[in-house]
Amino acid sequence: MARVRLGGMKLATWNVNSIRTRVDRVTAFLERSGVDVLAMQETKCRDEQFPRAPFEALGYEVAHHGHNQWNGVAIASRVGLDDVAAGFEGMPTWGDAAEARALGATVGRDVVDGGVRVWSLYVPNGREVSNPHYEYKLAWLAALRETAGGWVRAEPEARIALVGDWNIAPEDQDVWSMEFFAGATHVSLPERAAFAAFAEDGFTEVTRRFVPQQFTYWDYQQLRFPRNEGMRIDFVQASPALARAVTGAAIERNERKGKGPSDHVPVIVEIAE
DNA sequence: ATGTCGGGTGTTACCCGA
């Protein structure tokens, strides 16, 4: 197939908090933003319930992985969508259940050299530091790092994007009040260490250098958004070759406004060819 | 003051999760 489009691509990640409730807002965002690939989290539906038609009408292919009303991850792409994989090698289960928290696909083979291997990730919340879900979160992150590190070691020039809702605020400035979060998940040292450890395998978080301080999530409760009491928990970790190709990033704060928003907003990165 | 959102069900009243 001939190259139809050169010049890089725009990749975004967005925890949509139910795609069935949010599909109009999500497709409107795609139409006006010029995003070529959108990784979604918390679709909250089974595969057959995902509203594919509105995406396909705009020229996007969709891969979705969802078992039930919890979790659910997807990737929509108008620049190719190949080698789809649900879950990663070694991904821990929650009890007996392999949850729908990771979906990989190769996109952009015609617009970026070698394409980009995108993983749409919904990292477990952890609930409370004393809750078994917290140990599950740490184990899940450790397994992801082990597997993703192996990908980079096997293919050092691979362009790999680990994107999504990491449910970790890596720095104190990434929450509206460290007092409020004292003793809570998302800010604990083991979670922050787990996030930072990806750097040892060559991954770089590539949005902060372009957007030094901006929240990506505001709770629906307590007027958190009007008061700008949010958290920065949605990130893009890029392999060495991909990090070199990233030319910009943006956090779409305005998507938290208006009628029926998700509690998260899209995070966009621009990738050169 | 868990005061808001989702989706679910033994559904029109509550459950769980975030």
Image (spheres, coloured by chain):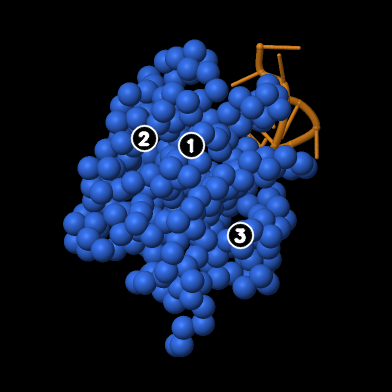
Chain colours: A blue, B orange
The residue indicated by pointer 1 is A212
Look at mark 3 in the image and give the residue it sits on.
Answer: A50
Nearer the camera: disc 1 or disc 2: 1
In the rendered view, would you say A257 is above or below A5?
above
Any part of residue A71 in sight: yes
- Image coordinates for residue A259, horizontal then vertical, percent: 77, 42
Q: Amino acid at mark 1?
A: Pro
Chain identity of mark 3: A
Mark-to-mark CA distance, 3 and 1: 34 Å
Within 10 Å of the Cα at label 2, are there few (<14), some (14-19), or many (20+) other Cα atoms? many
- Label 1, residues with CA under 10 Å away: few <14, some 14-19, many ≥20: few
Q: Is residue A175 left or right of residue A94?
A: right
Query: B9 or A74, which is in the foreground?
Result: A74
Hey, what amino acid is under mark 3?
Answer: Phe
For the residues tagged 1 and 2, is the chain the same?
yes
Q: Earlier in the sequence, mark 2 or mark 3?
A: 3
Q: Please state, as top left, top right, bottom left or bottom right, where the C terminus of chain A lies in the image.
A: bottom left
Counting from the top left corner in percent of width and height, residue B15 is at 60, 28
Residue A51 visible in the snapshot: no
Q: Which label number is shown at residue A120?
A: none
Real-space Cα distance between discs 1 and 2?
26 Å
Q: Would you name the residue on which mark 2 appears?
A: A137
Residue lying at 76% horizontally and 41% vertically, measured from the top left: A258
